[in-house]
Amino acid sequence: MTGALLQSQTPLVDTIANLLGIDGTLGAIVASLIGAFLIANLLLVQTAVAGPWAKRKITAAFTDRIAVNRVGPFGLLVIVADAVRLLSKELIVPDGVDRPAWDLGPLIIPFSALLGFAVIPMGSGIHLADPETGLVFAFAASSIASLGLVMMGYASNNKYSLLGGLRAVASNIAYEIPLIVTAASVVIFTGSLQMSTIVAEQTTNTLAVVGGVAIPQWFAFVNPFAFVLFVVANLAEVGRNPFDVPEAPTEIVAGYQTEYSSVYFVLIYLGEFIHIFLGGALAATLFLGGPDGPGPASLGIVWFIAKIWAFYLFTQWARSALPRLRIDQFIEIGWKGMLVLSFANLVLTAIIVGVIV
Amino acid sequence: MIIEALIAFTFVAALVTFVAPNKVAGKLAFGLSLVPIAGSLLMWSQFDATGNALLGGSLAFEETFEWLTLAGYELSWHTGVDGISMPLVVLTTVLTSLAIVSAWTPIDDRQSQFYGLFLFMEANLLGVFTALDFFMWFIFWEAVLIPMYFLVGVWGGPRRKYAAIKFFVYTNIASLVMFIGFMALVFGLGDSITSLGLPEIAQALRADELGTFYGIDAATLKLVAFVAMFLGFGVKVPIVPLHTWLPDAHVEAPTPASVMLAGVLLKMGTYALLRFNFTMLPETASALAIPIAAIAVLSVIYGAMLALAQQDLKRIVAYSSVSSMGYVILGLIAYTEFGVGGATFQMIAHGLISGLMFMAVGVIYNTTHTRMVGDMSGMADRMPVTTGIFIAGAFGYMGLPLMAGFAGEFFIFVGSFGSTVLPYAPLFTAAAMFGIVIVAGYLLLAMQRTLFGQFRLETDYEVGPAALHDTLPLAVLLLLVIALGVAPELFFQMITDAVNPILQTGGGL
Amino acid sequence: MLLQSQLPTWTALAPVLILGLTALVLLVFDSIDSDSTNSTLLAGTSVVGSLSSLAFAAAFLVEGTGQVSTGGEITLYGDALVVDGMALFFMAIFASVVAMVSIASYDYLREDQHQAEFYTLVLFAATGMGLMAAANSLAVAFVALELASLPSYALVAFLKKNRGSVEAGLKYFLIGAVSSAVFAFGISLVYAATGALTFSGVAAGLENTEYVGVAGLGVLMIAGGFAYKTASVPFHFWAPEAYEGAPAPISAFLSSASKAAGFAVAFRVFTEAFALSVIPAGIDWVLLFGILAVVTMTLGNFAAATQDNVKRMLGYSSIGHAGYALIGLAALSAGSAQNGNVLGASMAHLLVYGFMNTGAFLFIALTEYWDVGRTFEDFNGLAKQAPVACAAMTVFMFSLAGLPPFGGFFSKYFLFAGAIGAGFWWLAAVGAVNSALSLFYYSRVVKAMWIEDPDGEFELQGRPVGLYAAVMVAALGTLVLLPGIAPVIETAQSVAAALFA
Amino acid sequence: MNPWIAVGALGVVSVGIPLGMMAVSALLRPSVPEQGKSAIYESGEIPTGTARIQFNIQYYMVALLFVVFDIETVLIFPWTVIYRSALEQGASLSQVLLPMLVFVGILVVGLVWAWRNGAVKWVASPLAERRKTERQT
Amino acid sequence: MVPAEWYLLLSGLMFCIGLFGILTRRNALLFLMSVELMLNAANINLVAFSYQWGNVTGQTFSLFTMALAAAEVAVGIGIILVLYRNFNDIDVTKATTMRW
C-alpha cells in the first residue's frame, strides 16, 4: 500500500546528494546542511502563517469578529508587516539582567523545537534523519526548551519572570512523564523507537475493513485512550490553553517573557509556535500514521501538514473555548490524574498485548 | 563433672547475688560460697590423680567436650586437676568465703554488685586452676581481671581510680605479651599438634617438636617465647621490677579484694609460670637460671627493703608479698623436688598467710580508720583477740616453725640449696635467706609500734574489740595456717607427686 | 524446617526480598494513615520483617543453601546476583542489626512525626546492603551500594531541626557522593579494560588485558569506594562526624551493618573479580589493603584515644575496627590455603562487631533518651542509676577492646591468628598493639560509669522498654557469641573458603 | 550514512536561523536608551525588593518526584522495545510482564505515599487545616 | 573509529574537572554539580567502551548510573535545604557544630 511506497522513497538527504552529485562524508555534510535548511524553512513558513495571521483569524472566528483583513489578500501580507515591525523594534535591556543567560534563553527555544523535527518523517521522502532512537531524541530535543524558559525567567531579574520560569518547569515536568509513558505504550506495539518503523507499523497494517473502507492501524484507532492522554499531555507540554499557566497574562503578566522585546520576542514566539507544530508532529507520527493518508505516497507531506495543522487548530480552539486552570489544579491534575492514567494505560496495554500475542 | 558443676554453680550464684537486694547480698553470697567449698573438699577427698597433668599423668575429675575446630586446631572444654592445682582450688574456695565474710563490715554500698563480682571472680579463678585447654584457660585468666578492676575501682580508697586503671592496663598488656609469646610457640609447633590442649603442647615441646617459624630457629623461638611469657606472668606474680602496680592496687583495694589479690591472684602468676615456663620449656629455663634466680633474689630483698621503709600497714604487707613471691620463683628455678614442690606449697601457704594479714589489717582499719603505723599504738589493749591473731600471722610470715610459712620456705631453701640446675645455688639461697631477716625486722618493728605501748589514737568513738564475724575468718585462717604448718604432707604429698614428672623428663636436668 | 532446595531458586534471595517488602508495607501503612505515630505498629512491623529475614538467612545457612553441600552458589538474573554462604552470612548480620535498631527506635522516636519514613529508610538501606552482599557484578554492586547509601544520608540528617544531625548528614552525603563518583569511574575504567561487569567476566578479562594501567587505576578507585563504605582511610573522615551527629540508632546501624556491607561486597569483588590468580602483576591490591589496614586501625585508635565525647570516640573506634576487618583482605596471597581462614575470621569479626558495636551505640541512644550528655564526664556514676544497662555497656566496651571473656576477643584472635598463619605477622602485630591501646579509651567509659562519682544529682527519666530490650539483646549476643562462636566461625570460614574454590 | 550528521546539520541550522534574525534585527533596530525604559516591568508598579524571592516548596517537591519518575520512564523504554518481540519469540508472560509490573508497582507505592503525604498537594491551606482540627476537637 | 585513548582522555579530563570543582568549591550546589561531572565522566567511558567492546553492558549500566545520579541529587538537595534552614547558608565549610 502507501507505506511500501513511502518506504521506497529516497530520503531527502540522499536525494540532495544525488542531485548535486557529491558523496563521501563531506558530501553528506553539505547535503545534510541543505536538507536541514529546507526543512527549517518549511517550518518557518508554516509558523509565519500560523503566528501573525492564522492565529488571529481563528481566534476572531471563534469570538465572532473580524481580524487582519487590511493588508493584502485575506490580510496575508500582515505577516511581512509584522515581521519587519518586530525586527526593527528597539531591544530594551532591563536593569540587572543576567546577561549571558538572558541572551541565550530566546535562542534555545526555537533551537529545541526545530531540532526535534530532525527525526520526524514528513512523508514524500522528507525525512532528515532516521536514527534508531528517533522517538527518544524527539522528546529529548523538545525538553531542552524548558531549560531556555527557566534561564529566561531567572535571568530577567523580575519576580513575575522567575515565577513564570518555575511554573514552566513545573508544568513541563508534570506532564512530560504522562507524555512519555503514553508514548511508551505505543512503543509496545511497534517494538522500535525508530520513527520510520513506527510509521510503517501504522501504514502497512490494516485494523479493520468497515464497509469496504480499510481503516489503517493508526494507533489513535487502536488505543484511543492513549491518544487522548497524549494530546492532553502534549497540550500542557507546549504550554497552550488551558494549560498556559507559565505565561498566564492575568496572573504573572507574561511569565518568563515579560522583559523581552524586539527580535527576542520574535524568537520566543517563533519557538513556541514551532513547538506546537512539533507537538502535532509527534502526535501525528505516533498516533495518526504520520504522513499516511489516501492517495499516492507522494501526497504524504500534504497529509502530514494537514495533521499538524489540525493539531494547531485544536490548540487554538482550546485557547478560545477553555478557561485557564489554576496552578494548583494544573499540577494536581498532572500528578494525580495524568500520571496515574498513563501508567494504567501502559500496564493495560502491556497486558492486552501480552494476552493477545 | 564436679568441676563444671562448681564453675557453673558459682556463675549462677554470681548472677543471683547481682540481682539480690543489697541488704541480704552479703549473707546470701556467703551461703552460696559454701557450696564451692563443700565441692572442693569433696574433690580433695576423692582426689586420685597421679603425676603431672601436663606431662601425661592421670587426672582427677577430667572432662573433655569438643568445642570447635579452627585452622586445624581443636579447641575443647578440657578440665581436670592434678596435685598442683588441687590445693589451689581448695585455697580459692576457702579464701573466697572468708573474704566475703570479711567484707560484711567495710562494704556498705552497692553490696549486691560487690558480692556478685566476688563470686564471678571465684568462678573464673576456679576455671584458671582447672582448665587444661589453652583457650579456656586464657579466657578465665583474663576474665579474672574484670571483677578485680571493678572491686578496686568502685569500692577502693581515695586513689582507687588510678590504682584500678594501673592494675588493669599493666596486667592486660602483660597478658598480651604472654599471649603472643605462647602463640609463637603454637605456630612454631606447626602440624605436630592438633589442638590447643595444654598437655599436648607441653608434651610436644618437651619432645622437641618445635620447628622454625618465620625463619626463627627453635632455640631462639623458645627463648623469645620464654622471655615473653616470663614477663607476662611476672607482672601477675609480681617480680621486681614489674611490681609497681601491686602496692597501689593493694593499698586502694578494699580489704576483701586485697585478700583475694594477694591470696589467690598472685598465685595465678606463679601457677602459670610453673605450668607454662617451667614445665614446657625446662631447657630454656635452666639456661636462664642465673638471671631468673637473680630476679627472684632481687624480688625477695628489694620487696623486703621496700616493706621496711613503709608506714602504711597495708603497704608493708603488700611489699612483703613481693618478697614472698620471690621465694616461689627461686624454688621453681631450682628444679628439685623440694624446690618446685616447696614453691607450690609456698603458694598455698602464702595465700593463707597474706590473706590473714590483710584481713587483720582490715579489721584494725575498720575500727581505727587509719593504717599508718605512726598513728597507732597499744592496739593490744583494745583489740586483744585481733592482736593475737595478727601476731600469729606475722610469725607465720616470718617463717616460724609449725606455721605453714615455715614449711614452704624451708622446702624452698632445701630444694634450692641442692639445685643442680642453678649455678651458685648455695649463694643465691643464702642471699634469699637474708630476706627472712629483713622480713622479721619490719614485721617486728611494725607490730611493736602499733600493737604495744600506750593507746593514743584520738577518736570520737570507743575503739573496742572487733565483731565476731570480723574475727572469725581470722581465726579460721590462723587455724589453717597452723594446720598446714604442722602437717604439710596434707598437700605436699600430692604436690611432689605432680612435680616429679617435671624434673624427671627434663632432659638431663 | 523450611528448605530452600524445595523452592524455586529465586527464593534464595528471600532475606533481602523480605526486607524490601517490609519497607514497602510500611510505606503502605504510612499512605493509609500518614499522620500515624503508632510506634508499636511501625516498629513492630519493622522488627517482624527483619526477624523473619534473619530466620530465612539463618535457615538457609543451616541448610547449606548456595554452599558446596547443596550444589554450590546460586546465581540469579543472568549472573547479576549470587546467593552463597557469604551472602547469607552477611544478610544475617544486617537483619539482626536492623532488628535491634528497630526495637531501640521504638522509644527513641516516640514523639517523632515521621516514624514510618524512618523505618522504611532503614529497611531500604538494609535491602541495599543485602544486595551488596549478593552482588555478582560491578553494576549491581554500585546500584546496591547506592541503595544502601541514599537512605542512609537521609537517616543521618533525620533530626532536621538538630544542627548536628543536619551537618552530619551533609558531610556524610558530600563525601558519599564523591566516593560513589570515584567508585563509578573506577568501574568504568575496569569495564574499559575488560569489557565486562560481572565478576567472572572481569576476572576473565583481566587475565589478558592490554590496559593494565587503566585496570590498575580502576581497581584503586573501586578500593576507594569501598574505603568510604567501610569508613577506612582515606575516605574515613565522614565517620566520626556522621556517627556523632546522627540519631544514635542510626549511628549503630551505619557503623555496624553499613560497614559490614562494604566489606561484604569488597570481599567478593577482590576475591572473585580481581582475584589474585588473574590480576596482572603490578596491581598489588594486597599491599594496598595492608597499608590501608595498618593506617586505618592506627589512626582510628589514636584519634579515639583523644576524644572527650563518647559517641565520637565510638565513631573513631569504628574506624579502628574497619582496620582490623581489612586484615581479611590484606592477608591474602595467591593460592594460599589460609585465605579462607583469614577472610572467614574477618567476617566473623564483622558479625561479632555487629552485636557489640550496635549495642554500644544503642546504649548511647539510651543516654540520649535520658539526656545525660555526651562526654565521658557526663557518664560519671551512671551505674548507680542504671546498673543493668551499664553492665551491658561494660560488656560492649570490653568486647570491643578484645578482652577474652567476650565475643570480641574470639573474632580478633581468629583474625590475628589467621594473619600470622598466612604469613602476615606484621599485620597481626600492629593489630595486637592497637588492640591493647584501645583498652585505654574503652575502659574510660567503664571507669566513668562505675567508678567516678556523679558531678551532681540527676534523675533518669523513665525506663524505655524498647531501648533496654535492644541493648540487652545486643549484650546477650555479645556474650552468647563466646560459647556459640563455634558455628559462627566454622560457617564463616567455610563460606569464605568457597570464595577461593 | 550516519543519521546523526543530518541531525547535527539541523542543529547548526536551527542555531543559525535565530542568529541570522538577530543580526538582521541588529541592523534594523534603533537604540534610544532612556532611564524609564530599562526599568523592570512589574505591572506598572515601581519594583520593590530583589527578584530572588522565596517561592513555594512544592516546586522542589514536584521536581524531586519528577527526577524519580523521569528516570523510571527511561528504564521502562528498553522494556517496551523488547516486550513484543520477546513474547513473539516465546517468552512467557510471567517472564516479561511480571518484572515490569513489579517495577511499576513499586513506583505506584511510592507515588501513593507521596500523594498521601502531601508531596503533590500544591497549596497546604493553613485555614483549612485549622478548620479540620477544630472540628475534631 | 576514534581510538579508545581519546575517550579515556576525555573522560579523565572531565573527571579531573569535577574533582577540581569538589576541592575548590564551597557552595554545596556547585559541589553537587562537580559530582555530576565525575559521574558523567564515568558514563562516557561506559558508553564509549560499550561501543568498543561491542556489548551493551556498559550502556545499560550508564542508564543506571544516570538514575542513581538523579536520586543522589534529589537526596542531596533535600539535605542542602535543611542545611540552609539550620545554618542560613549553603557553604559547606560553615557547618561546624562538630569538630572536623
Image (cartoon, rainbow, N blue to C red):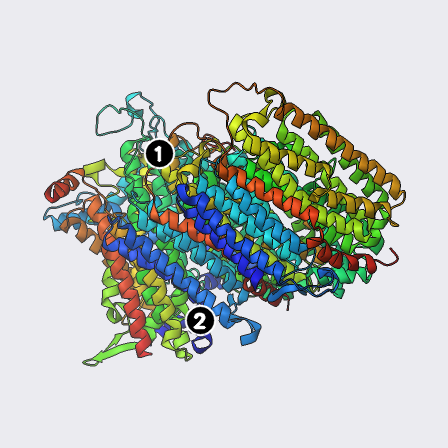
Amino acid under label 1? Glu
The mark closer to the camera, 2 or 1, is 1
Q: Pick the residue in front: E19 or C40.
A: C40
Q: Pick the residue in front: D90 or B341.
A: B341
The C terminus of chain C sits in image quarter: bottom right
Residue A228 image point, x, y percent: 23, 62
In the rendered view, does C446 fall on the left or right side of C427?
A: left
- 2 and 1 marks in contact (CB < 8 Å): no
In the rendered view, does C154 fall on the left or right side of C271?
A: left
Q: Which residue is mark 2?
A: C10
The N terminus of chain C sits in image quarter: bottom left
Circle 2 residues within 10 Å: few <14, some 14–19, many ≥20: some
Q: Which residue appears at 41% of the width and 57% of the height?
A: A137
Circle 1 residues within 10 Å: few <14, some 14–19, many ≥20: few
Amino acid under label 2? Trp
In the rendered view, does C198 fall on the left or right side of C388?
A: right
Q: Pick the residue in front: C64 or C259.
A: C64
Q: Which residue is mark 1?
A: C459
Residue B218 image point, x, y percent: 83, 56
User: Compared to D80, does D56 lie above or below?
Assistant: above
Query: Callout 2: helix, strand or loop?
Result: helix
